[in-house]
Amino acid sequence: MKLERKHAFVLLGIAVWNVVTYLRFIKALVDTEDRPTGYYVAHTILIIVNLVIAGVLGTWGVKAYKAAKASS
């Protein structure tokens, strides 16, 4: 499957959205009242996984953009 420029923008948009929303989530997690340790562990793992996903999607988006730019 050949990725076009529009696919690259979608991938980059999703990556940026994940980063923005999870950075806000980190701020909210820090500002909350006392919670059980499991709450913080579970949400920290979710944050890490989603930021890794954002990194992967961002990398794919950049590669797709460069490939689309080179082919045109």
Image (cartoon, rainbow, N blue to C red):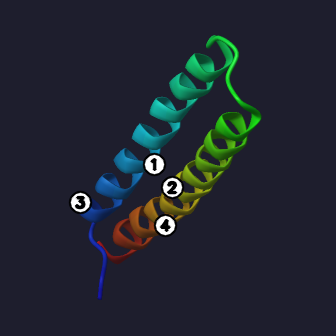
Dot placed on the residue nearer the N-terminal end, 1 or 4:
1
Residue 8 versus residue 51 in the image, above or below: below
> Residue 31 appears at what percent x and percent y?
64, 11
> What element does badge 4 sit on?
helix
In this view, the residue farthest toward the left is 6
> What element does badge 3 sit on?
helix
Cα separation between marks 1 and 2 = 5 Å
- Disc marking residue 42: none
Dot placed on the residue nearer the N-terminal end, 3 or 1:
3
Kindly check if marks 3 and 4 are in contact, taking CB atoms under 8 A apart as contact. no
Name the residue that disc number 1 marks: 15
> What element does badge 1 sit on?
helix
What residue type is disc 2 on? Gly
Cα separation between marks 3 and 1 = 14 Å
Kindly check if marks 4 and 2 are in contact, taking CB atoms under 8 A apart as contact. yes
Name the residue that disc number 3 marks: 6
In the image, 54: left or right of 45? left
Query: In the picture, which quadrant includes the N terminus?
Result: bottom left
Residue positioned 65% across, 36% down in the render: 39
Kindly check if marks 1 and 2 are in contact, taking CB atoms under 8 A apart as contact. yes
What residue type is disc 4 on? Trp
Dot placed on the residue nearer the N-terminal end, 3 or 4:
3
In the image, 2: left or right of 43? left
Cα separation between marks 3 and 2 = 14 Å
> Residue 4 appears at what percent x and percent y?
27, 70
Cα separation between marks 4 and 2 = 5 Å
What residue type is disc 1 on? Ala
Residue 40: quadrant of the picture? top right
Kindly check if marks 1 and 4 are in contact, taking CB atoms under 8 A apart as contact. no
Dot placed on the residue nearer the N-terminal end, 3 or 2:
3
Residue positioned 23% across, 59% down in the render: 6
